[in-house]
């Protein structure tokens, strides 16, 4: 769990079906602190930070980072927390370039 802009956030690694690629999701944590806010419900999805790329050969704990859905949020996480490590690799999908990173949570 971490705090971002006055909210406690939980992380969860699951997998995309049917290929089993890692999916990184964030949820509003079920904490007393978050219960004081009325704009988000504890347990509610906050963001999905990964993009599924079928038939891509990922290394251990690698994901394709979604910089386009929540760009400011993702860039803040990259600079403020050590959740991701850059690999120098990228994937082109639907005309956009997405970085491949290693997740360390």
Image (cartoon, rainbow, N blue to C red):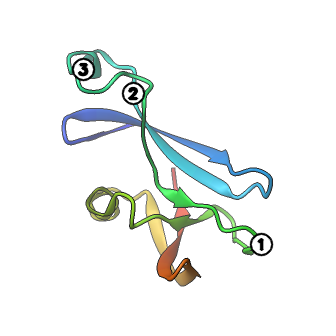
Labelled disc at residue 29: 2
Going from the N terminus, do you reach mark 3 or mark 1 first? 3
Q: Closest to the observer: 51 or 86?
A: 51
- Above or below, 91 against 11 in this view is below
Farthest residue, direction right: 18
Judging by the rendered image, the residue that carries numbered circle 3 is 33
Q: SS for tag 1?
A: loop
Location of residue 73 by image quarter: bottom left
Q: Nearer the viewer, mark 3 or mark 1?
A: 1
Instruction: Say few, some or many: other residues with alpha carbon within 10 Å of mark 3 (under 14 / 14 to 19 / 20 or more).
Output: few
Instruction: Say few, some or many: other residues with alpha carbon within 10 Å of mark 1 (under 14 / 14 to 19 / 20 or more).
Output: few
Percent from the top left, x then y, of residue 101?
Answer: 52, 70
Percent from the top left, x then y, of residue 86?
Answer: 47, 75
Residue at image location 34% in from the left, 19% down from the top? 31
Q: In which quarter of the image is the N terminus?
A: top left
Q: Which of marks 1 and 2 is in front?
A: 1
Q: SS for tag 2?
A: loop
Determine contact: label 1, label 2, CB under 8 Å: no
Labelled disc at residue 55: 1
Location of residue 28 by image quarter: top left
The residues bearing labels 2 and 3 have C-alpha atoms spaced at a distance of 9 Å
């Amino acid at each position: 769990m971490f705090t971002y802009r006055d909210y406690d956030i939980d992380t969860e690694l699951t997998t995309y079906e049917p290929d089993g690629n890692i999916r990184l999701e964030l949820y509003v944590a079920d904490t007393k602190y978050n219960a004081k806010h009325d704009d988000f419900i504890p347990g509610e999805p906050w963001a999905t930070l990964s993009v599924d790329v079928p038939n891509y050969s990922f290394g251990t704990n690698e994901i394709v980072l979604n910089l386009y859905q929540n760009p400011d949020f993702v860039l803040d996480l990259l600079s403020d927390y050590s959740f991701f490590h850059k690999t120098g690799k990228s994937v082109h999908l639907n005309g956009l370039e997405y970085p491949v990173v290693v997740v360390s949570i």
